[in-house]
Amino acid sequence: MKKKNIQRRVLPAIGIVVVMLFVPAMTKAQAEVSAGGDLVSSYIWRGAYCGGASIQPSLGVSVGGLSLTAWGSVGLVTSPDYPDEYDFTLGYGTGGFSAAITDYWFNSSPDYFNYRSRETSHMFEGTLAYDFGALALSWNTFFAGNDYNGDGERAHSTYIEASAPFTVGSVGLKAEIGFSPWEGLYSDKFNVVNVGLTGSKDVRITDMFSVPVFTKIVFNPQVRHTYFVFGISL
């Protein structure tokens, strides 16, 4: 028991140290640093409503095909049903192929460093994706953390998506469809959970300044619900 408690305290600390060493090493290797954020009318993720109007900041560093990204979503109105979210993603990409591991954390528990099974608010997901240009495919599966089915066993909740970008006039568009192949976070069985269309363009404010905006309509056939989102990217 003592050994397990030590691991629960030491392993997260080791992870933080690795990140602290990893980022400076990347920046010294002519890494690219990005910072930005979105303001959205509602937070819709993979066909599910995850909160109302939100600010979603991001900060990332990359070198070569390796990247480390922090992303969050903070609701403009606090709701215990839709807690704030903070994610870290370690990814690698080459050509059209990419792979990533993401640590999702939801502020339903004040203890970020609680990694105890069935108590933690963390969820860990592995992603494999390939972008063919005209079509992109991704497979996303939770492999650890707070992800269990109705029987109390690990669900390995999985979301598979196909998306296709195209342009009409000055508007960039992306159509997507996503489904869950089995019982888990997204559905209680095989189901299409996300059919969406996103449109984005730069809105000119002055001759020297424009703002990227996007709108997205989402239909979730499983719950028979539609969402319409407006966002501004900075």
Image (spheres, helix red, strand yellow):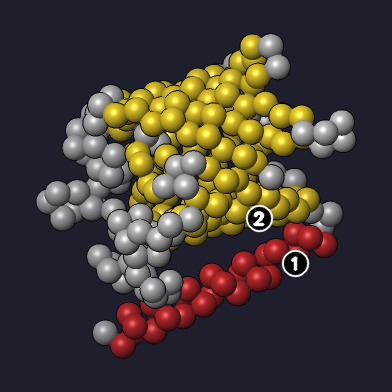
Q: Is residue 164 left or right of residue 83?
A: right
SS at circle 2: strand
Which residue matches tag 2?
59
Which x, y percent locates residue 132?
60, 21
Q: Residue furthest right?
A: 208
Q: Position of residue 96 (x, y in %)?
A: 63, 29
Most foreground residue, 159 or 220? 220
Q: Nearer the viewer, residue 234 or 112?
A: 234
Image location (x, y in percent) of residue 53: 47, 47
Q: Residue at x 53, y 46 (%)?
A: 100
Q: Residue furthest left?
A: 151
Provide the secondary structure element on which disc 1 rests.
helix
Q: Nearer the viewer, mark 2 or mark 1?
A: 2
Q: Image quadrant of residue 84?
A: bottom left
Tell me the kind of residue under disc 1.
Answer: Pro
Count of residue discs: 2
Quarter residue 165 falls in: top right
Question: Which residue is drawn at the image coordinates 42% and 39% (left, top)?
Answer: 44
Whether residue 178 can be seen here: no
Q: Amino acid at mark 2?
A: Leu
Q: Distance from label 2 to label 1 (Cα)?
A: 14 Å
Name the image quarter holding the N terminus.
Answer: bottom left
Say which residue appears at 34% left-offset and 65% top-offset.
108
Q: Which residue is mark 1?
A: 24
From the viewer's side, name the closer residue of 5 and 38. 38
Is residue 150 toward the left or the right of residue 12 in the image? left
Q: Is residue 61 visible?
A: yes
- Rendered residue at 30%/56% (across/down): 81
Is tag 2's residue or tag 1's residue first in the polypeptide sequence? Answer: 1
Question: Which residue extends farthest front?
Answer: 206
Circle 2 packing at 10 Å, graded few (<14), some (14-19), many (20+), is some
